[in-house]
Image (tube, rainbow, N blue to C red):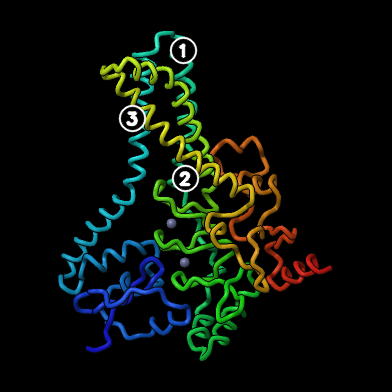
Amino acid sequence: MENEIYIGTTWGCIVVAECESMRPITVFRPYEEEVSAILALPVKADCRPSLVNSEKSGRNNLQNVFMILFISPATMDETEYLHKRKRFVFCFKFAKSVPVLLVCSLIGYSYFCYNFQLCWHTIEAVWQRILYMFLYHVILIMLLWSYWRTVFTDSGAVPRKFKLPDEIVEQFKSASNEEGKLQAIEKYANDLPIVTRTYIAGRATYRFCFICNHLKPDRCHHCRICGVCVLKMDHHCPWVNNCISYTNYKYFVLFLLYAFLFCSYIVITTLPYFIDVWKNSTTAQGGIHILFLFIIAAMFFISILSIFSYHLYLVGYNRTTLEAFRAPVFENGRVDKNGFNLGLRNNFKQIFGNKYVLWPFPIFSSSGDGVVFPQRYDVVIGASMNNAEATAAHHAMMYP
Ligand SMILES: [Zn+2]
Ligand SMILES: [Zn+2]
């Protein structure tokens, strides 16, 4: 039948595909007001929900685009499709884990080179062997612990109260003009602790995720790879196969710190033996491993130094990577890249917590709830304070 199409989501874009062949007709990033119109188009009754309903695509967002492009459910029976789909999901998950496996392999290789080739076979003094191996293991444990927590910590779901009730969604869809749609959302959002805004139709209004169907809390963004909204999203990191967000930012910074220490330590302790191997042009197996170990550690030392110092700068100014590229917009359309900057000490405390003893360990100690963040005007919006009250308090501070 004419007009029958499949609709799926990919990377925050909408895919419209032919219902018979599943070949994409168009892939585009819609303006907010176009979404409801697109979702209202007639779709085939038996189409599979994960490919059709943008609300249900959930975590499989990036997965869906490849599935739409490579698997055509319309051309095969249910069993064959489910079998192919299962295999596809496995391959996709494996492909995303490759960078993590690479990091683990490099750490494993460094372990072999450092402990067996350098400490055991090359260094002669026993005290030096023991000291070098002891310090290596201390840094390694901290590195692996931080890495583990960064990779396996859930990036944080948006609380249910930010989800729009069905009646508000209906009001939004049925509103005839832009103003009506925005008013439907604003009526609900006024009671939520949200101070950041976006520009729609020339005015600052609440940020809304059309894929997850909820209002975005402050500093929350939709991750196109994970397919969900993430609290205080920093960026999606392929090296940890996870989003760096409110829940694991401390672990990520500690991972960078220990990776930096790990590489520095290897470079410093291996340098004399590297020079020795280089000068004598030894081709013995141990010599080649020490050569490789030094070169790999030096390369990572340089790249991690730049990433680590950049994130120290961001923590110092209380900015996420996304906010560094695009400053947040506050009430009344005020664009302020320092909106959450509370001063160096407080900024570090927001990430690492009030107990200094917990700072070096990948144990959760960040302050707040990932939803409400104090602003530099010292207006702290408590859970009991609604948005109108917070705005009034904010204005009282700004314009006494
Ligand atoms: Zn979202
Ligand atoms: Zn992500």
Label 1, label 2: how far apart the Cα atoms are: 33 Å
Q: Callout 2: few (<14), some (14-19), or many (20+) C-alpha neighbours within 10 Å?
A: many
Q: Callout 1: few (<14), some (14-19), or many (20+) C-alpha neighbours within 10 Å?
A: few
Nearer the camera: disc 1 or disc 2: 1
| Viewport quadrant of the C terminus | bottom right
Label 1, label 3: how far apart the Cα atoms are: 21 Å
* Ligand 2 image position (quadrant): bottom left
Which is nearer the N-term, disc 1 or disc 2?
1
Could you tell me if residue 194 is visible in this image?
no
| Residue at 40% over, 46% down | 239
Q: Which residue is mark 3?
A: 109
Q: Position of residue 96 (x, y in %)?
A: 33, 51
| Viewport quadrant of the N terminus | bottom left
Q: Nearer the viewer, residue 73 or 206?
A: 206
- The quadrant in which residue 102 appears is top left
Q: Position of residue 187 (x, y in %)?
A: 62, 80
Left or right of 77, for residue 257: right
Q: Nearer the viewer, residue 181 or 125?
A: 125
Q: Which residue is mark 1?
A: 128
Q: Is residue 130 above or below residue 234?
A: above
Which is nearer the N-term, disc 1 or disc 3?
3
Q: Amino acid at mark 3?
A: Tyr
